[in-house]
């Protein structure tokens, strides 16, 4: 079942009643000049079980503890945004799988060679997907990228990830030859940042549901990063966000420093983007669950390969 991604960008009261998220808009409720029926109709309810991700993007949003507990119990992720209206934090459930401790132990006990092999598969899939997006949206040759993907060794000691990234970012935005990928850089970096934050939450949520620790990465290991594994596993999915950003850029005459509601709304479609995985078309949120499930089986020894989507097949 595809879960909903909900975005709140205005003042709102969010509470829980009868397993429903209740949304009240104070600006409408308190507008005495509006007819009573309209004020009552401003209250909305959404079943908790239908919610996958909630984005809180306004300083005047009030949310009850009962609602937070119910959302976490149903494995929903909550993203909090700063006063600059960019994602800054994420809240995830502590448990989402019936054999958590066993999965945790298998993940923590994973050998260095296994982690290096999993990272090799991850980078190979990432470069292939970057090449596919570049091929679909530009006239640039991607032959060298496929060679690099093929040559990635266990642990990526030659750092083909970085080599491919240099070529990819130099060419992926055809009308922006001087573009530099920098989280603090000029637009469309802000579109990418926002999209990657949604993707990261989607991956982290799926990892918890698969009984894995988002903090224990196979490659990323920054002591200050609580989502090292999410940052690992989202790598092959980043090109799908890039593809959506290319499409958003083509829709608007200019990308402002502060993203508009319409642009954020476009990015909220990330969890339902169609991708090809295992020979089948799946919404990205479902595909990520398949990826994290296969990763858990790699840690347990049931599988040797992570299931990742293939952007080239998606084009066909």
Image (cartoon, rainbow, N blue to C red):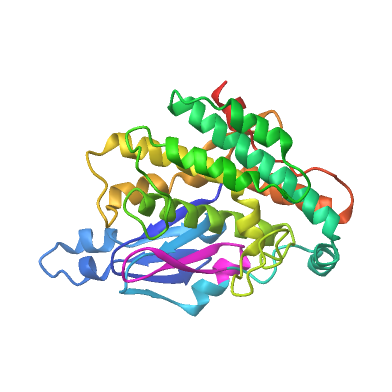
Q: Is residue 112 magenta?
A: no
Q: Is residue 161 left or right of residue 78?
A: right
Would you place residue 239 above or below residue 24 in this image?
A: above
Q: Is residue 73 left or right of residue 43?
A: right
Location of the N terminus (image quadrant)? top right
Quadrant of the rendered image containing residue 230: bottom right
- Could you tell me residue 135's position as x and y percent? 51, 26
**Looking at the image, which residue is at 73% across and 43% down?**
121
Region rendered in magenta: 70-91
Q: Is residue 86 magenta?
A: yes
Q: Is residue 78 left or right of residue 185?
A: right
- Could you tell me residue 251's position as x and y percent? 29, 35
- Could you tell me residue 157's position as x and y percent? 73, 50
Foreground of the two, 230 or 223:
223
Quadrant of the rendered image containing residue 92: bottom right
- In this view of the protein, can residue 7 be seen by the observer? yes
Would you place residue 42 above or below residue 66 in this image?
A: above
Q: Residue furthest right?
A: 301
**Looking at the image, which residue is at 54% across and 44% down?**
165
Would you place residue 166 above or below residue 91 in this image?
A: above
Quadrant of the rendered image containing residue 316: top right
């Amino acid at each position: 079942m595809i879960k909903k991604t909900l975005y709140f960008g205005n003042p709102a009261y969010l509470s829980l009643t009868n397993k429903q998220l209740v949304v009240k808009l104070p600006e409408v409720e308190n507008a005495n000049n509006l007819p009573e029926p309209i004020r009552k109709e401003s209250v909305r309810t959404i079943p908790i079980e239908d919610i996958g991700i909630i984005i809180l993007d306004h300083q005047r949003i009030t949310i009850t503890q009962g609602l937070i507990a119910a959302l976490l119990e149903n494995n929903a992720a909550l993203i909090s945004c700063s006063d600059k209206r960019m994602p800054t934090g994420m809240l995830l459930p502590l448990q989402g799988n019936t054999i958590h401790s066993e999965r945790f132990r298998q993940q923590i006990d994973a050998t260095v060679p296994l982690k290096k092999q999993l990272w090799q598969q991850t980078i190979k899939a990432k470069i292939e997907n970057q090449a596919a997006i570049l091929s679909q949206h530009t006239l640039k040759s991607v032959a060298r990228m496929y060679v690099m993907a093929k040559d990635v060794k266990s642990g990526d000691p030659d750092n083909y990830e970085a080599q491919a990234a240099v070529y990819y970012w130099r060419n992926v935005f055809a009308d922006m030859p001087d573009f530099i990928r920098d989280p603090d850089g000029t637009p469309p970096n802000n579109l990418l940042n926002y999209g990657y934050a949604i993707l990261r939450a989607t991956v982290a949520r799926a990892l918890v549901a698969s009984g894995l620790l988002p903090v224990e990465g196979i490659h990323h290991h920054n002591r200050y990063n609580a989502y090292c594994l999410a940052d690992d596993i989202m790598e092959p999915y980043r090109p799908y966000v890039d593809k959506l950003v290319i499409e958003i850029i083509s829709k608007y005459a200019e990308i402002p420093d502060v993203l508009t509601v319409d642009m954020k709304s476009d990015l909220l479609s990330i969890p339902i983007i169609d991708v090809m995985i295992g020979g089948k078309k799946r919404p990205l949120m479902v595909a990520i669950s398949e990826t994290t499930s296969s990763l858990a089986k790699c840690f347990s020894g049931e599988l040797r390969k992570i299931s990742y989507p293939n952007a080239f097949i998606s084009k066909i």
